[in-house]
Image: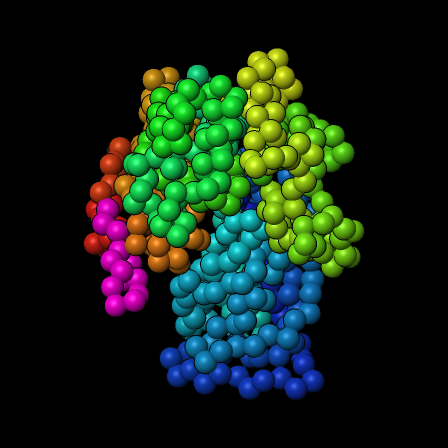
Amino acid sequence: MRKTVLAGMPLAIMPLVTMLALGGCSEPAPAPEVEETPILMQAGEWVLTRKTTGYNTPTVTPEQYQAALKQTSEDKVCLSVDAEGLPDVAAMAGKDGTDCTYKDKMVRKGRMIATLACTAGKGTSEIALEGNYTADTLTLGETMTQSEGGGAVLRAAELPGDTFDAVVAVTPNVLAGDQGRALYDYGTDAALWMPCALNAAAYDGVLLARPGGAKSPAGANRCASLKAAGLVNADDAQAQAEAAREHLLAGGWTDAAVAAGVLSSNFDLWRAVNVTYASAYARTGPGDMPCGYSFAAMGADGVARAPTAAERAAWWSDASGIPPGSGVGLRDALASGADPSQPGNTCLRALWDDARSAVRAGIEATRAAPPRAGLPVIVVHGTDDGLVPEAFSGGAYARWAGAQGRPVSYWRVRNAQHFDAFLGLPVLGMRYLPMLPYGYRALDAAWAHVAEGAPLPGDADIATTPRAFKDGALAPLSRENLGAMP
């Protein structure tokens, strides 16, 4: 009986049968000499045939399922084989992933078992291979696990039936029933208030909040804008910053989340996310985005221009969909004055305040329902997440689901925020731990539960130890840094 763990990061499972047959390249590379492997795959031209034998995703329809079963492809590839007898990893992955590496592998006596770790679209994929080979044939069963975002898998957990045996969601963006806050709500609030709040004394130790060791001039301008709009009463810039901080804390933010939010604030990510989400929720076209915003290809001088054919071709694979990036920038028709983004941010916030707006209607349509009864669910979230605060999303979902009689195992990870990719910067790497190891541990725990009958770990508040920075280098990540995982 096949078991499926849906993970978020989320997972789409696609079992395939892959068959290869050896032909001949004009100049085939020599076969590897591996003494432990009596049967050696030969390098050369192979015919790769892929046929889909099963297809499961959270929203697959019967029509899509039947169409998927008809998918076949046949390609000729000049396959190389390394000294361990492993075939070329790119050929094994095919179109299911790029930049793949062998995570683990075993090739011996006509048997191949391997796992590939790859990039897939905006996320990652893991491809498990198992099968038999001779010198000139290779037949493999393949299971591809793709991950993109935690909120989607929690919505998939609502589906009836037995498609999934367990669900794992890491740092999900999810609006849980009548709990938490929508990303657009706290995102538009943060876009207005956080630049000013980061000048409060509580964040004097946050290096990115103190450019050149001083309070942020842009933050001071925002404080002045809030004063001019009647949103803060203090005349003194420092008192205005303290009032802005108190506003965020009253709305459920923590100091740790605000401190990590400096990344989104400094990079103007809040505004870019809010514009994109407002357009999606209101279902506008590119020519009538809310509040006079628009996307445009831009040169280094910030002036709009026509995109090149190469840029347009790369948008699908390289762009996140949120500017700036891949040559696309954000145009703000309301920008003016010493604090140019404030008018547009105020307009975007008003779309949330208007309970009858198209944006609010779109957001309401995204509210989650409880997971399927009896479905094992693990949610993992960092306590310092400054983009999707755990109090508004993962934590709120776990509390709400439990109150609905659908208990969720909730793991809070101390000293962890949203962007693992930024931890290569020492200023962030010595402050935060990556989330991905906890996601892998949750997947292992869920699999052990559904496949081996092991108890599902319960709630956990995971204490961690940030890495040290000494002698000009960040210390390697160790088990001691990660703490005791459930």
- Confirm whether the magenta stretch covers residue 302: no
User: Residue 411 in the image: x percent, y percent?
Assistant: 30, 36
The answer to whether residue 384 shows anywhere in this view is: no
Residue 312 in the image: above or below residue 470: above
Q: Quadrant for residue 108, please give it.
A: bottom left
Q: In the image shown, does 231 or 174 lie closer to the viewer?
A: 231
User: Residue 420 in the image: x percent, y percent?
Assistant: 41, 50
The magenta region covers 464-477
Residue 293 in the image: above or below residue 148: above
- Confirm whether the magenta stretch covers residue 475: yes
Give me the residue at 34% from left, 17% from top. 403
Q: How is the image coloured?
A: rainbow
User: Residue 382 in the image: x percent, y percent?
Assistant: 34, 39
Q: In the image shown, does 15 or 303 lie closer to the viewer?
A: 303
Q: In the image shown, does 466 or 462 lie closer to the viewer?
A: 466
185 to the left or right of 448: right
